[in-house]
Amino acid sequence: MLNTADILETIQMIRQENLDIRTVTMGISLFDCVSEDSNRLCEKIYDKITTKAEKLVLTGEAIEKEYGIPIVNKRVSVTPVSLIGGAHSPDTYVQIAKTLDRAADTLGIHFIGGFSALVEKGFTDAARNLVDAIPEALSVTDKVCSSVNVASTKAGINMDAVRLMGKTVKQTALLTKDAGSIGCAKLVVFANVPQDNPFMAGAFHGVGEPECAVNVGVSGPGVVSAAIKRAGDCDLSALADVIKKTAFKITRVGQLVAAEAANRLDVPFGIIDLSLAPTPAVGDSVARILEEMGLSCCGAHGTTAALAMLNDAVKKGGVMASSHVGGLSGAFIPVSEDEGMIAAVSGGCLTIEKLEAMTAVCSVGLDMIAVPGDTSEAVISGIIADEISIGVANTKTTAVRLIPAYGKKEGDTVSFGGLLGYAPVIRLNTASPEKFIARGGRIPAPIHSLKN
């Protein structure tokens, strides 16, 4: 039976505390699109996506209207393109990226993910060709997102891939320099990548997924922050309980939308991703949650502990609200997409070293961080290697999305627009790890990977 108080509370969350469904993402398998003819391959990809997701946007808009719940993004993720592109050349992979972009425009969706490769143990020819195509592909498309998984706890770290991704990030930044190097905002490097993630830029439709599925990402940093403020000066055990109960309520809203979307689109419901995904808007910040917990500024000593508690409480509350939880699930800390993070970096309180420490206890990793445009490939690869090592050693997902903003130096600002926001260019340690990175090979999997 519907409870009037619960309904009114949800309305308040939406109207006053920025509660929304951050994304409804339809995952689509492209395995049946394989063809040796590049034109036929692209034609089949376009037809499959535009047929399966034909009603995605209209369905999302209808649910928004009927329930009054904002759905910020409608997106599509596809099978990692390197798995269906075969031995085609990098030029054909660019052609595929353009096809994905055209399909996204036809559907009216915001982003399409899956221009991806899984290379944690080594490169196939197809994966190598896709990675070689990434800089051009992201420079000639608007909505295509790319990801590369370079490590896993089971396989260790492919340092050849880490080195190549440092070069790829730099090339992508160069080719999109006239737009603030925005191509890098659509490129993420992973360890232990989840194959049912609805969030961009890392979303793709994994090999164990059904023909089609609906995955939903919920969000509500403003709701959690408001709940903590109402809780007052309680102790941390009580505060964790407040966060858990709030996460439960947020996730139930996501469960409702996910079930409705899956039913109306006649595809299986995949997962709910519990992640607290911030935006540049005031009142929608993960950093401000941490400050509401008692820190004078995000980045102060104690930040990692506060974030660990927040992340754990969000997961515990969300798991009770949905039978199928997946994706990343936790608290995101993307600098350019979080008003509080932007302020903390600009004020000098939050450094890249502290951000790296925070990633050991939260979702994703070093995310949407603008660095000086003259940062070397080796330093970028070193940052990737450090962050990926945290994921491998801790059996968790970590990722890196760096933007070397051409023509920008420490203290400058680069703007990406929309949900991608803007970011101050952060200070880096420029001492070179080049000789270490150039060794190549694989860092072996940690001993605790042997769990069979």
Image (tube, rainbow, N blue to C red):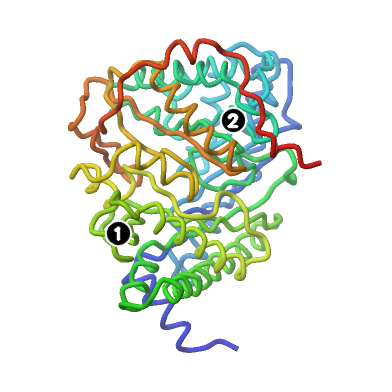
Point 74% across, 32% down: residue = 31
Is 269 positioned to the left or the right of 140 in the image?
Answer: right
- On screen, 451 above or below 326? above
> Residue 344: x and y, percent?
24, 47
- On screen, 425 above or below 63? above
> Residue 142: x and y, percent?
42, 31
Element under label 2? Answer: strand
Label 2 crowd bin: few (<14), some (14–19), many (20+), radius 10 Å: many
Cβ atoms under marks 2 and 1 closer than 8 Å:
no
Residue furthest right in the image: 452
> Residue 363: x and y, percent?
50, 48
Seen from the viewer's position, the closer of residues 166 and 32 is: 166
**Residue annotated with mark 1:** 288
Label for residue 149?
2
Is 300 positioned to the left or the right of 144 in the image?
Answer: left
Point 44% across, 33% down: residue = 186
